[in-house]
Amino acid sequence: MVTLAHYLTLSAILFSIGVTGVVCRRNTLVIFMSIELMLNAANLTFIAFGRHHGNAAGQTIAFFVIALAAAEIAVGLAIIVAIFKKLGTVDVGDIRFLKG
Amino acid sequence: MENLLFGISVGSLAALIPALPLIGALLNGLIALLCRSGKRDVPKSLVSVIGVTLPVLAFAVACYLFSLAKDPATGFTTQPLWNWISIGDFSASVSFKVDRLSLLMTLVVTGVGSLIHLYSVGYMAHDKGFARYFTYLNLFLFAMLVLILGANLPLLFVGWEGVGICSYLLIGFWFEDPEKAAAGKKAFLVNRIGDLGFLLGMFLIYSTLSAKGLQAPGGLLSFEVLEQYKGDLFLVATPICLLLFVGAMGKSAQIPLYVWLPDAMAGPTPVSALIHAATMVTAGVYMIARMHFLYALSPIAMQVVATVGMSTAFFAALIALTQSDIKKVLAYSTVSQLGYMFFAVGCGAFSAGIFHLMTHAFFKACLFLGSGSVIHALGGEQNIWKMGGLRKRMPITFLTFAASVLAISGIFPFAGFFSKDAILWQGFATGHVVLWAIGFATSGLTAFYMFRLLAAVFLGKPRDEHLYQHAHESPPTMTIPLILLGLLGAVGGWIGFPEALKGSDRFFHWFAPIFAYEEFFAKLEARGHGLELVLTLMTLIWVVHLGLIANVLYSQKIGRMGALAEKFAPVHRLLSNKFYVDEIYNFLFVKPILLVSEKVLWKFADQKVVDSLMVEGTAETVGLLGRTFAMLQTGMIQTYVLLFAVGAIVFIGYFVL
Amino acid sequence: MELAFFYIFAAISVISAILVVSFRNTLSSALALVMTLFGVACLYAMLEAHFLAIMQILVYAGAVMVLFIFVIMLMNLGREELLKIKMSFAGVVGILIGGYLATILVLRLSSLSSPLPEAPQGYGSIAEVGRLLFSDYMIPFEITSFLLLVSIIGVVVMARKETA
């Protein structure tokens, strides 16, 4: 029988993988994708809890997260493209505009 | 005791006395500020009028107060003007003690002070600091009066410090000359050392009394309260008296803190007359007379006071024998006479000490003003070996000077005879025979060097023709005070005509209720009048003898004195170089302090520790911290992400686990 | 039965996620992410959030990932990334962090092992979600639409050619 713990554990694992990806990888796009992974894990948690309490609010919040993630990806990718146009690379180690 | 004059109470009159010179100081100060740096001409007449009439008014008020308040003898303390300090259980209020002692001192200070103010009008007439001078002089008078009239130790100390400041300002009056400025500095510093002792004495009194949980409305340090509780101070009386005496040593120039007084002659001569002859230096004697009840509890302290006093008297007299500056002779003479006064109070003869204080004020001020007259006439010359025969050119100065010389030598019937005789007799009668002998010898020395001075300056033949032609008698503003003081020096002692000479000894009896010192009376009565007469006659013969010898030697046989000096050259050098005391002090104290100040405090503590370590170090540390923290701002996203993740995980870990 | 399905979908999600993070080729990462999204969508369906499962596939896997792949192809990254194999200090730390996080969360969460209750009627249907959106969560809904507008404007501004 699938319990709440199963879903939450899965969500935790997905989130951790996302964190690892953000910290480890140097490719900006992969970092972005890891962020998406983390968002998905959070979504799963929301929906699992919503189901647990019988409240559809969890789904509503997940709905908003999806919408926001879409908006965020759009803007983020626009930034990455702009940086790519300037530096010619998407290696995150080469982006040092904020140094000092 | 609230007699009224035009509706003004005695208390207000007492407060008026110091207030009048203060007003003078403020007004003159204002004028001085407005006219500084020669922007405008100083209105000399206005300044003189303010500067002289206000002390004269104070004298008049003091006379009136004297006539009112001389009974009861024990005096009273006026109502406080305002509550000055009130911290926890320590309080002191501004109130004045009006009794025979303070009234007499007030009369002396305002009287002699007014005369000297008048004299200054003539003496300082060509000085560009005229207004400033009178400001300081009036301010000094104010401070001295606060000292005398103060009803508690803190207020006395305020006056004490005030006269110290004014002394510094006036000694260094011509401060453009570095030597004169240094003399003022020296006076203040040496005084400060004495003040430390005074403060410690006050602290000791307060801590002893407050530890016993005593309360008093006027503050624990007011004289009435102290007299009331003197029994509680019995155990610590000796340390307190000795500490207060250290203060007196500084202020009244006794060994070892006398070194500032000869240097203080760098100031204008009226200043020397007022401050360093008549008033400020007597503050120490006054203080001991005020605290007589405390000193009576400690025979050890009294013995110390008497011994130091007489040693100083002898020592200074020796130095005065060989000085060639007219003012330096008088300065050492002052130190010597102050020693007599301390000897007197140290033997318990408080009224004798005050008597000598009064007569000394008269003749010493006259001597200084006379010397000022000579210096003024000779255009600034102060070396007695360049003078001589001035009696023909400056008769009034000569006569008053001679009268004062007779007085200081203690020759009948001038003032000094009575006061010195009283001191020596009462010292002998209380058992201080050795010190009496030294005093006897010193009085001879005093007569000798004073007649030496008189002869060298006024008698004989002029040694410098050019200066002699230049000499002229001084204007009336200067001669009138001289005449008045000379007269006082002649007759002022008659109120202390001893009973041994069929007088009524009024001065002594007048003060007796204040210094109610029973054993003392008993001792004196026991010795009898016969012995007193014998000693008095002995002293008189001795001083007349030496005076005549000096007179003859220095007026006619002056060449032989030069040869004599060379014959005893080492001794002469020792004495004329003041026993090298200044050099010794310089070596022992001044040089080490300067060395420490420069090498340790300046180069090390100030430059290295404060400037480099603390000031620049702080800046450097801040910069260092800033740069360290700036290392976090790598600009690399991965770093930020890493830190972010670590932080978040710590948080999560804390809440989850 | 249900458990088996759960494990299958979970495995798909986790393995795809690991692949996202490990592939050297960016395009492969993107495609792995699509697989992950798909797996997660199936899990949503298991949780009876049908509407959201379809939304996930349509919007996330469909539109967003397509955008991603457009950008990747635009940058033409393929080959270069392949050469970067060296593991940096940040990499090691990252793995440690991930492991640590997984551990603490799992430890904590595995205690909530109560079985899921019966879902109410109509739970997860579009009607139910729509009802909530237009009643309780009206304001966030409107703000989200505003936010989308803002992001569109932002993207347009940033992607604009610099007029010389």
Image: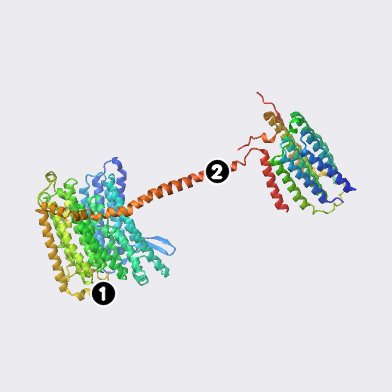
The residue carrying mark 1 is B519
**Tag 2 residue:** B624
Packing grade of label 1 (10 A; few <14, some 14-19, many >=20) is: few
The quarter of the picture where residue C27 lies is top right
Q: CA distance from mark 2 to mark 1?
A: 78 Å
The front one of B320 and B272 is B320
Q: Is residue B69 visible?
A: no
In the rendered image, residues at marks 2 and 1 fall on the same chain: yes
Which numbered disc, 2 or 1, marks the residue that appears first in the sequence? 1
Instruction: Tell me the kind of residue under disc 2.
Output: Leu
Report the chain holding disc 1.
B
| Residue type for callout 1 | Glu
**SS state under label 2:** helix
Dividing the picture into quadrants, the one containing residue B310 is bottom left
Q: Establish if B646 lies above or below C150.
A: below
Out of C54 and B387, give the one closest to the viewer.
B387
Vertical side of B220 occupied by B121: above or below: above
Q: Quadrant of residue B39?
A: top left
- Nearest to viewer (mark 2 / mark 1): 2
In this rendering, position of residue C69 left or right of residue B208: right
